[in-house]
Image: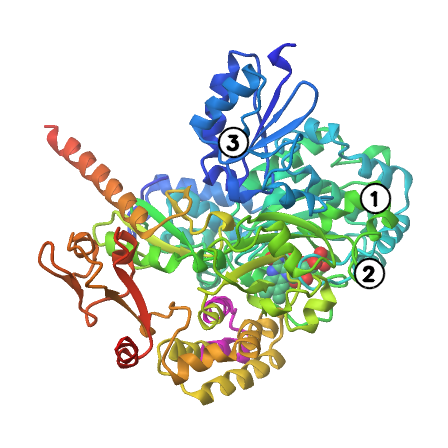
Amino acid sequence: MIKVKNNSPATGDNIKIIDEIVRRHNIHRGAAIPILQEIQTTFGFVPPEAITRISDLTGIAESELYSIATFYAQFRLEPVGKNIICVCHGTACHLAGAEKVTEALQHATGARPGGTSPDGLFTLEKVACLGCCSLAPVMTVNGETVAKVTPEKARAVVKSLREAAQKNKTAKGGRP
Amino acid sequence: MGTGQYKVKVGLATCGVAAGGQKTYEKLRQLLSGLGIDPEKTGCMGMCYCEPLVEVITPEGKSYVYGSVDEKEAEKIVREHIQGHRPVKELLVLSPEEETEHSPYMEKQHRVLLGFLGKVNPESIDSYLSAGGYEAVKKAVGTMTPEEVIAEIEIAGLRGRGGAGFPTHLKWKFTREAPGEQKYLVCNADEGDPGAFMDRSILESNPHGVVEGMIIAGYAIGATQGYVYCRAEYPLAIKNLRKAIAEAREHGYLGEKICGSGFNFNIQIREGAGAFVCGEETALLMSMEGKRGMPRFRPPYPAQKGLFGLPTCINNVETLANVPCIISRGGKSYSSLGTENSKGTKVFALAGKIKRGGLVEIPMGMTINEIVFDIGGGISTGKKFKAVQTGGPSGGCIPAELGDTPVDYDSLQAIGAIMGSGGMLIMDEETCMVDVARFFLSFTCDESCGKCTFCRAGTKKMLEILDKITEGRGEESDIDLLVELGEQIKAGSLCGLGQTAPNPVLTTIKYFRDEYLAHVRDKRCPAKICKALIRYVILPDACVGCGVCRRNCPVNAISGAPKEPHVIDQEICIRCGLCQAGCRFDAIVVETGLPEADTDKKR
Ligand SMILES: Cc1cc2nc3c(=O)[nH]c(=O)nc-3n(C[C@H](O)[C@H](O)[C@H](O)COP(=O)(O)O)c2cc1C
């Protein structure tokens, strides 16, 4: 994933990457969604400067691109935290206590569902059914599925991620 | 007899991986490499409740299935069974020698479609070919006219498995007869119903089956191009499907002049972007055209004017996966299963408070009780069976008293539920029906695209009323208001989302009115779920004052001196339940209703 600063003017390198993505998809009709999807996989979110650039290249109005990006739940218009935790809120997970898991995560991370914690460490998301209903409740932590989560288990995961980040920081800070 | 002839398969669909199957697989690979055996990856074996699953096939071809196999168990299986030739009894879930407690799960099913799942390697076309794969394409494209293919589907009586149950042969016929050179076939793999994972499992575990079904459908309707519109939340399904499409092309089942005929067909994948309404066919087409996925008025139906204005046939994953089975075995054999108006089998995702949850395939017409008790083994919590929910946010809650209802399109419709796409959620006494209704409504309210006022504003209003009720601020008249509003939303919405969104509320009111009344009259949640109506209370006699709950509480609502009974400050408590979960002395209980009433009872 490439790091770009939100709202920063697109740098030359980023522009090149965006151009390449648009070029690859623009051969199909109705390519706006695949383009935005690849922009998000590349940058972690859809930066405003990317929207401007896509609009310039494809002729699709910026307003239309924004209307698409805000309609679909997949698209994020803001950068995400270091760790992404998604809690499944499908029916089976709901019955098995997903609400309590999300609540515990909210307290442990300081992030509200749909938001990022002030320290930038965690983004917390409530997601629609992940389809692992027999292992409910489930969550994904940076893409890896964790089955049969309890509030305690969720808190322990946050704790270990926090410690890992701390270690990383001191290791970096320790070097001259 | 060399050990090299043993075959070992590991179920590595999403459920298996989530349960740790990848580690089991790696361990087996490491252990078996010395014995010259290469464990094979396979898809979902259907017994999601005891993943990770490992199948050992002996040199004589006998199959033993082991459940809940972690690394330690894997070692034991290799040592005792593969090297020692003695099956590890205590880990077996299915055995050729004797009945296990799990046997009824499989025996009661009729696995036509699922027969491939967990048997074939989804990443290998050779594996599918050796199981008889692509014979149906050869038969259809090589020896039948498109009309004959459609006639065979008519004899089979196949109805759409995506929810609406529309006869498949009619849809194909309409698209075939629509004027135009270029036509499209779209496989709807958006599977957005929370609680449904049949389509995901089929795509992950037998992608070639879907590709084969699409080729035959494409041939029958005269399509030039096929698309799979798949949820982005299903990365493994997309990966396996992509590989299957590439391999099918290499083998000449896709591309130009398929099987030596004049038929050309290709398949592309489009990823959804997270909008439930895009499962609706006209919204799906909008999304594929790169727009906001908002449904449009029908007619014209997609068969006349679909993708980019051209005739388009949209079918569900399971519908298409049935097609090769029908062509291979003949429509007659297929229609011998099921009921008068609902032919064949249906796959269900059995989940919720059920002992044996997973992917099950039953002949239509089997009763709910047979599914819950014979196949599913009853309720997992040991509590009473209360209701089953079918059809997700479009469906209804069926009370346990109606457990004798046969599962087919018409019988379910008659009691206010629907077959839906195949989610089947089992609920016990600890499930609050008002909370369930609220859950589904908050889902549809969120997912309403906003086009129709009744759906957009009406679901919001219903949600507000349900919030009021679950928060203890409800009045009796609210219940009638919900019914009235629900009927109006159904009448005033353009697409199936709004037309069915009130169903979970209406059916729970119809069958569980008492529970609604308990919430509004007595401010009580009988299932002890609704937060505003419950309290966590520490029993002074049972509490030893260990302090675990005090330390666990995220809001510091618990106080007490060491070794003294603790108390919870109800004003601060957020009812997260962490205290109860961590208490080793069962000293924390949940109460509901007005506190005075409770204290009165105790006295
Ligand atoms: C809100 C809504 C969501 C839907 N979601 C799906 C879905 O996820 N998968 C599906 O196959 N059909 C879904 N449908 C039904 C489709 O509109 C369509 O009827 C179906 O794909 C047709 O295929 P079939 O005839 O093979 O069943 C949905 C319908 C509505 C109204």
Which corner quadrant of the image does residue B569 belong to? bottom left
Residue pointed to by mark 3: B90
The number of numbered discs placed on residues in the rendered structure image is 3
The subunit carrying tag 2 is B
Q: Is residue B372 above or below residue B205?
A: below
State how far apart marks 1 and 3 are (Cα): 41 Å
Q: Position of residue B45 (x, y in %)?
A: 60, 38
SS for callout 1: helix
Q: Which image quarter is the C terminus of chain B in?
A: bottom left
One can see residue B312 in this view: yes
Q: Judge left or right: residue A40 versus residue A157.
A: right
Which residue is painted at 45% across and 43% down in the image?
A19
Q: Judge left or right: residue B43 versus residue B540.
A: right
Residue pointed to by mark 2: B170
Near-viewer residue (A7 or B186): B186
Q: Position of residue B57 (x, y in %)?
A: 64, 24
Q: Which mark is residue B327?
A: 1
Q: Is residue B502 above or below residue A9?
A: below
Q: Look at label 2 and name its amino acid.
A: Leu
- Which residues are the magenta region? B438-461
The subunit carrying tag 3 is B
Residue B78 is inside the magenta segment? no
Q: Judge left or right: residue B339 versus residue B297.
A: right
- Badge 2 and badge 3 both on one subunit: yes
Q: Quick check: which quadrant has ligand 1?
A: bottom right
Q: Look at label 3 and name its amino acid.
A: Glu
